[in-house]
């Protein structure tokens, strides 16, 4: 089994989506209350980000209450996107809360960094993130373009279609006629969502760990460990092994 270092931004979802054939047709309507709330939350998110920028620049720390608020905004957004048109992964209506909801099919958490680089805060959200911006633009920002009248004197471009929207459209049509969500398609879509959310947290100055260039597919994040750092045992590494494991190892 391939080992992958856990990334500080953990994005999980139910590995087996259970959704109805046609509810996705009206989810845009059902989500209007969330869209209204999220509009104001994201205005606050950016304002908090500006305050955090100067706090990190002068102190090297992201104020914990501000950090927790922005994690909550990302968490709320991910639940709405998972229910809606970033994944269509559940029919369970998203809760109105910034807090973690352990039994909801979509979860997000970010490990709180005790210290952040004062220098990186000046460049990571724009310069260092440029390669990821290019990739994310293909995923969700209309990076796939449909050309019309190519090569003619009056060369024009049609509307941009994101890769995520295209794949979700295919998944929705298959779901409508078969009642099943194609698992390979679901896994790929969740990989793109995970990539975007990692980049979002990095550019929001919430971590200094550079997002990996890999598509971690499937609902379960390969780094699904508690986001809060676990303090080392005073007895050393051997104390972290359960007694049963130690005994079985000795038997071998």
Image: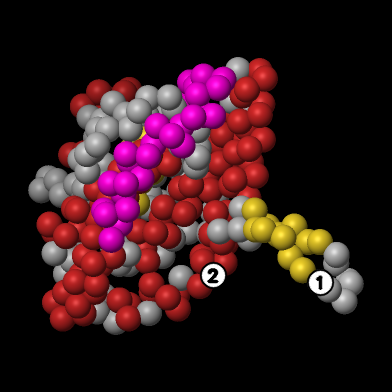
Residue drawn at x 42%, y 75% is 126
Residue drawn at x 67%, y 20% is 177
Decide if residue 44 is on the left or right side of residue 198. Answer: left
The foreground one among 166 and 196 is 166
Q: Which residues are the magenta region?
A: 16-43
Residue with the mark numbered 2: 131
Residue 246 picture location, percent across and down = 26, 29
As for residue 196 lying within the magenta part, the answer is no
Q: How many marks?
A: 2
Examine the rendered structure and indicate whether residue 170 appears above or below residue 181: below
Classify mark 1: residues with Cα within 10 Å, few (<14), some (14-19) or many (20+). few
Residue 45 picture location, percent across and down = 26, 60
Q: Are marks 1 and 2 in contact (CB under 8 Å)?
A: no
Give the overall secondary structure of the magenta segment: helix
Distance between the alpha carbons at the discs numbered 1 and 2 = 28 Å
Classify mark 2: residues with Cα within 10 Å, few (<14), some (14-19) or many (20+). few
Residue drawn at x 81%, y 72% is 155
| Residue 219 visible in the shown view | no
The foreground one among 181 and 116 is 181
Residue 233 picture location, percent across and down = 14, 46
Please tell me in which quadrant of the rendered image residue 64 appears. bottom left
Can you tell which mark lies on residue 175?
A: none
Residue 79 picture location, percent across and down = 36, 38
Residue drawn at x 23%, y 67% is 47
Circle 1 sits in a helix, a strand or a loop, which is it? loop
First in residue order: circle 1 vs circle 2:
2
Please tell me in which quadrant of the rendered image residue 251 appears. top left
Decide if residue 66 is on the left or right side of residue 186. Answer: left
| Residue 88 visible in the shown view | yes
Decide if residue 11 is on the left or right side of residue 70. Answer: right
Residue with the mark numbered 1: 155
């Amino acid at each position: 089994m391939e080992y992958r270092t856990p990334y500080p931004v953990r994005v999980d979802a139910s590995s087996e989506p259970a959704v109805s054939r046609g509810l996705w047709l009206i989810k845009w309507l059902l989500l209007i209350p969330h869209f209204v709330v999220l509009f104001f939350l994201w205005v606050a998110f950016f304002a908090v980000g500006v305050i955090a920028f100067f706090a990190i620049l002068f102190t090297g720390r992201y104020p914990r209450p501000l950090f927790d608020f922005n994690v909550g905004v990302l968490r709320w957004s991910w639940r709405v996107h998972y229910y809606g048109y970033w994944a269509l992964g559940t029919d369970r209506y998203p809760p109105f809360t910034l807090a973690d909801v352990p039994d909801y099919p979509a979860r997000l958490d970010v490990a709180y960094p005790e210290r952040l680089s004062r220098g990186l805060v000046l460049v990571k959200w724009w310069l260092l993130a440029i390669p990821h911006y290019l990739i994310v633009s293909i995923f969700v920002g209309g990076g796939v373009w449909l050309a019309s009248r190519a090569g003619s004197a009056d060369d024009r471009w049609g509307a941009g279609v994101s890769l995520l929207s295209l794949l979700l459209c295919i998944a929705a049509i298959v779901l409508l006629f078969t009642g099943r969500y194609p698992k390979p398609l679901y896994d790929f879509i969740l990989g793109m969502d995970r990539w975007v959310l990692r980049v979002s947290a990095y550019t929001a100055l919430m971590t200094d760990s550079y997002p990996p260039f890999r598509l971690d597919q499937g609902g379960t994040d390969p780094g699904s460990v508690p986001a809060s750092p676990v303090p080392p045992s005073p007895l050393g590494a051997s104390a972290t092994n359960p007694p049963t494991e130690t005994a079985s190892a000795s038997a071998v």
